[in-house]
Image: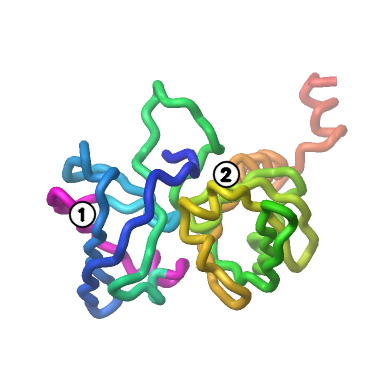
Amino acid sequence: MFTGIIEETGIIKAIKHGVQSSQITVQAKLVVEDVNVGDSINTNGVCLTVTAFGTDFFVVDVMPETIRKTTFNMLQPGSLVNLERAVRLMDRLGGHLVSGHIDGTGKIVRRWMEDNAVWLKISAEEIILRYIVDKGSVAIDGISLTVTSADMSAFSVSIIPHTQDATTLRDKKPGSLVNIECDIFAKYIEKLHTNGSSGRKIDMDFLARNDFL
């Protein structure tokens, strides 16, 4: 589990392509200071398991499903990636709970400035937008951001200078693809609303029949 507060940006050092999978070596400094094999590192929003590491790099395996659902098929040596180690229970939760399980990708359709803030408008499929609400949380390439507006075709976020400087968003332009993870609580609420797998919706009649009213 992560918070969406990026610790550093790393550089893709090498990519070994399999038939459908990949092995990626990431050059980094901060996130490898206390790393162990088996640890999770959020890489551009994707939770990946460290299989090997050195003083300035770590290695991860990327499954075919991850490549299908994310922008990882676009990475190449030299690409910058956002990095965050898994949260510890004693840490402050500065962002929101991020699992590192990507729901899909979106496209930046507009970028503009407002004083010190950068605004991004991002289009996505309906299956993603259904979980995004105004003033809710969303993770973009692993970065915890607040949704400033949302409709049936796109949503917008506003980015402070620190986030611009400390993450890969500084290089994103209209047309760039990004990884999106929706707030997991929205999915649980939807599941509960349909009463699990029974298909029965939780409405006023259901609550009355089960003595909640």
Picture quadrant where residue 211 is located: top right
98 vs 204, nearest the viewer: 98
Residue that badge 1 annotates: 58
Q: Are the residues flagged by discs 2 and 1 in contact, CB closer than 8 Å?
A: no
Front residue of this view, candidates 165 and 208: 165
Residue 55 placement (x, y as % from top left): 14, 48
Quadrant position of residue 2: top left
* Magenta span of residues: 50-71
User: Left of 44 or right of it: where is 110?
Assistant: right
Image quadrant where one finds the C terminus: top right
Q: Type of residue at label 2? A: Ile
State the SS at label 2. helix
Question: Picture quarter containing residue 135?
Answer: top right
User: Quick check: can you spot residue 9?
Assistant: yes
Q: Residue at the location (61% across, 40% down)? A: 185
State how far apart marks 2 and 1 are (Cα).
28 Å
- Residue 49 in magenta? no
Residue 51 in magenta stretch:
yes
Task: Give amino acid for label 1.
Answer: Phe
The N terminus lies in which quarter of the figure? top left
Query: Which residue is painted at 30% across and 45% down in the image?
Result: 40
Q: Earlier in the sequence, mark 2 or mark 1?
A: 1
> Is residue 197 visible from the viewing direction of this image?
no
Res 184 label: 2
x and y percent of residue 125 in the render?
66, 68
Label 2 CA crowd tier, 10 Å (few <14, some 14–19, many 20+): some
Secondary structure beneath disc 1? strand
Residue appearing at x 50%, y 53% in the figure: 165
Note whether 181 is above or below 172 in the view shown. Answer: above
Q: Is residue 44 left or right of residue 127?
A: left
